[in-house]
Amino acid sequence: MLELSWDGFIEHISQGWNVGKPPYGYLAEKVPHPVPARRAEGRTKHRLILDPLRASAVTYIFQLRGLDKLGYDAIADRLNLDLVAYPPPEPARPDAALGRWSGSAVREILRNPKYTGYQVWNRRAMKKGGRYNDPKDWVWSPQPAHEPLVTKELFDAVTTVGRQRQGSRTTHGPNAHPATKRSYVLRSYVYCDICDRRMFGKTRHQISYYACQPDPNEHRDQPWFPDHPKTLWIREQILITCISRFFDTRIFGHDRRSHLTAALKAARSADDAGDRIANERAALERAITAIGQRQARLIRTLADGFGGDDAADDLDPEQEKQFRDAIRREHATLGGQRQQLAEQLARLQAPKQVERPADSAALLDALPHLEVDLALVPEEIQRRLYTAFGLEVRYSRPREEVTLRVTLPDYLLDGLVSVTRELEPWNKKSGPCTEVLEPDHGTRGGQVRQNRHVRSHLSSAPGGTPSSRSTRRSSSSWASRTAAIPWGSG
């Protein structure tokens, strides 16, 4: 009976029928039961249709999580600012309603794959306390069964945000903690290339740095610890200058297509190097296997008394001892050769494959052309820009090199365009400003900052209108390196 019940639920989901209460943002549309006998009894089944009052809230929640990387409570606070536009969920028991959004309600929406348009069953084990099952045990309908509110790519990206935010305070603007004396605009974006850990902000003589200081008691057993300096620092001013130049040339500049072409060409060269390394690895593996087979034959020769050769019976004990010693020496020599080949194989690492979608240039063309010094942009807008583009800054002290990486996902392109428009008041290529306010002076990283808040009209980006959704099928991700870092004083 359990097997029949399981098969029935699978068939129910395969046909696109909904099981249980409709998720927030959807309504249940009653459909007469497809079986005549059940239909005669007045039985019905349900399909999901959009709830016009709540569907937009679901899309907004996924955008805040995917674009701004906000936490559950932070998203709930945003929704609670306008409960008319974003009505809170209503539980099955009216007396348990909070009348507002909560972090747990947001979490339930972000975990529900039905918003992708597919019907999904067996997400939770109701007989085991309602715990969530492993996603590989979920049962999906083979085809979309209702209108989606988010794309499958956005849903998959949102599920990884929690792991990316682990141990980081990825919020916009200065740190709101009452004990905060100074905020760092690049917190949570800078990584040490040696240990792959986040670097933290420190201040010396009113100059901001990012530092990495491993704890010997905690990290002594790590493989990277012997090669890691006791402490390494880099100035915030240097990093912001590199980031501003990167966005100015590769993201917003008129020559961004040529930079992308060069990056793709370098990636193709990396693929060629990867093929060469793959061939070398295959050759080393074949050599190691051949040596292992020779060693196995030598061991069998010793065990079988020289292979059962009649000539071996005529050997005196001294000669037999010499033969056995020779076989052992040969086995030891082969073992040394095999160890050397194994070490070469371990050092031979293939380069990481870089995703290079065909329409990467179309994603760049959808962004406006700007010329902005990000050091003059307020911290809140800077962090919103960096978070939306998934900025990753990796500092390599041995090579004195900074590597910058951003990602342009097609399913968040509209949000990326909206974020870039916030930079227009600081665009050097903008037309005449209608109003200029008094400069706001401040210091960060030993650099005098002058923020001019202006109000101007947005100019249309060259190259026409952004490409349609049908042409955005992938994401563009590539990196830029800045070598020979100018250290300056301090």
Image (cartoon, rainbow, N blue to C red):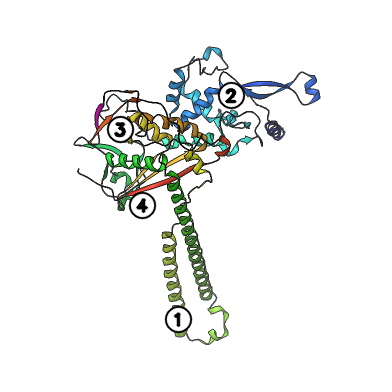
Q: Name the image quarter holding residue 382.
A: top left
Q: CA distance from mark 4 to mark 3?
A: 41 Å
Q: Furthest-top residue in view?
A: 95
Query: How far from the left and from the top, in percent, is residue 291?
Result: 49, 70
Q: Name the image quarter holding residue 140.
A: top right
Helix, strand or loop status at disc 4: loop
245, 480: nearer the viewer: 245
Of labels 2 and 1, earlier in sequence is 2
Q: Which residue is disc 1 drawn over?
A: 321
Q: Which residue is disc 3 drawn over?
A: 376
| Mark 3 Cα shell of 10 Å, populated few (<14), some (14-19), many (≥20) | some
Query: How far from the left and from the top, in percent, is residue 83?
Result: 48, 16
Q: Main secondary structure of the magenta part?
A: strand
Of labels 4 and 3, earlier in sequence is 4
Residue at x 78% of width, y 26% of height? 35
Q: Which residue is disc 4 drawn over?
A: 223
Q: CA distance from mark 2 to mark 1?
A: 81 Å
Q: Furthest-front residue in view?
A: 432
172, 122: nearer the viewer: 172
Q: Which residue is disc 2 drawn over?
A: 23
Helix, strand or loop status at disc 1: helix
Quadrant housing the N terminus: top right
Q: CA distance from mark 1 to mark 3?
A: 83 Å
Residue 265 visible here: yes
Q: Magenta region: which residues?
A: 436-445
Instruction: Describe residue 444's horizontal placement relative to residue 12 as left or right.
Output: left
State whether residue 342 is above or below residue 134.
below
Give the foreground label among 1 and 3: 3
